[in-house]
Image: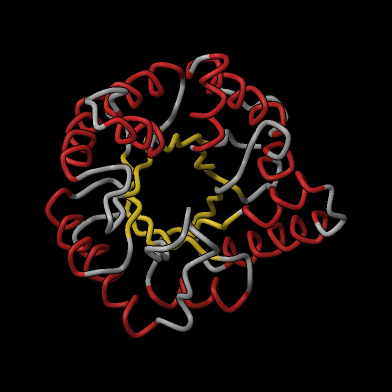
Amino acid sequence: MSRLRLGVNIDHVATLRNARGESYPDPLRAAEVAIAAGADGITAHLREDRRHIRDADIEALAALCVRLGRPLNFEMAVTGEMEALALRLRPHAACLVPERREEVTTEGGLDVAGGFDRIAPSVRRMAGAGIRVSCFIDACDDQVDAAAAAGAQVVEFTTGPYCDAVRAGDPEAGLYLEQLRRAAQRASAAGLEVHAGHGIDFDTVAPVAAIPEMRELNIGHFLIGESVFIGLPAAIRGMRERMDAARGGAGA
């Protein structure tokens, strides 16, 4: 089985920084440490309310990733402001996500089917500028089909329902995992590259990583949280080891 890429989301390094209004911890330094520890790319979400990552962070991260030869995955709401920024910076990838001001974190996937007439033109404009466009969606047929019809090159399935069920000891966890497997097969058959993320930790990563169609996992909150205890490089290496083991030892 092919090697699975690991994108490290550094949003919550910025959350810590902003809690005290200081200049540290620096998300740029976190990105450098993550790449040195084996991350294949960096993910950052510039929210409309700038609650963690800020404009200057995205500017600096875009330059850093170019310099280090690693992709930046720019998570963004489907708004004119964010599209204009993406078109100016030309990150390797733009992942379209839903966003509500009152939410603590992203809740579920983007409704591409329901918002097709608004989302598809944005996808086309960014793809036309050479940006690899991804849609962060729930693992269901209508969203996969809509993402493909909109011209996205990638879908990223939300693993939140599965991971939450595992942590709660909910027997529905197996059903959520099977939905992910089926959706990954459908997306791959439609020519979409398959990614996943949200809520993944050491205890939930292996079954997701073992899905044959999966090509990338984007993980952030757990890695930043675990780094408080064991350090960011060790947390990333621990995740990398579990991902590789789930793929039958397909390392670098």
- Vertical position of residue 103 compared to residue 44: above or below: below
Left or right: residue 5 versus residue 54 is: right
Left or right: residue 61 versus residue 32 is: left
Q: Position of residue 20 (x, y in %)?
A: 30, 30
Quadrant position of residue 171: bottom right
- Residue at image location 59% in from the left, 23% down from the top: 251
Rendered-image quadrant of the N terminus: top right
- Vertical position of residue 118 compared to residue 229: above or below: below
Nearest the eye: 58 or 194: 58
Nearest the eye: 15 or 62: 15
Q: Position of residue 160 (x, y in %)?
A: 62, 53
Q: Position of residue 127 (x, y in %)?
A: 27, 63
Nearest the eye: 154 or 226: 226
- Residue at image location 33% in from the left, 77% down from the top: 120
Q: How is the image coloured?
A: secondary structure
Nearest the eye: 136 or 21: 21
Q: Tell me if residue 177 can be seen.
A: yes
- Vertical position of residue 149 compared to residue 60: above or below: below
Q: Position of residue 44 (x, y in %)?
A: 34, 43
- Vertical position of residue 236 compared to residue 70: above or below: above
- Residue at image location 46% in from the left, 60% down from the top: 103
Q: Tell me if residue 252 can be seen.
A: no
Quadrant position of residue 200: top right
Quick one: which residue is furthest to the left in this view? 88
- Residue at image location 50% in from the left, 15% down from the top: 231
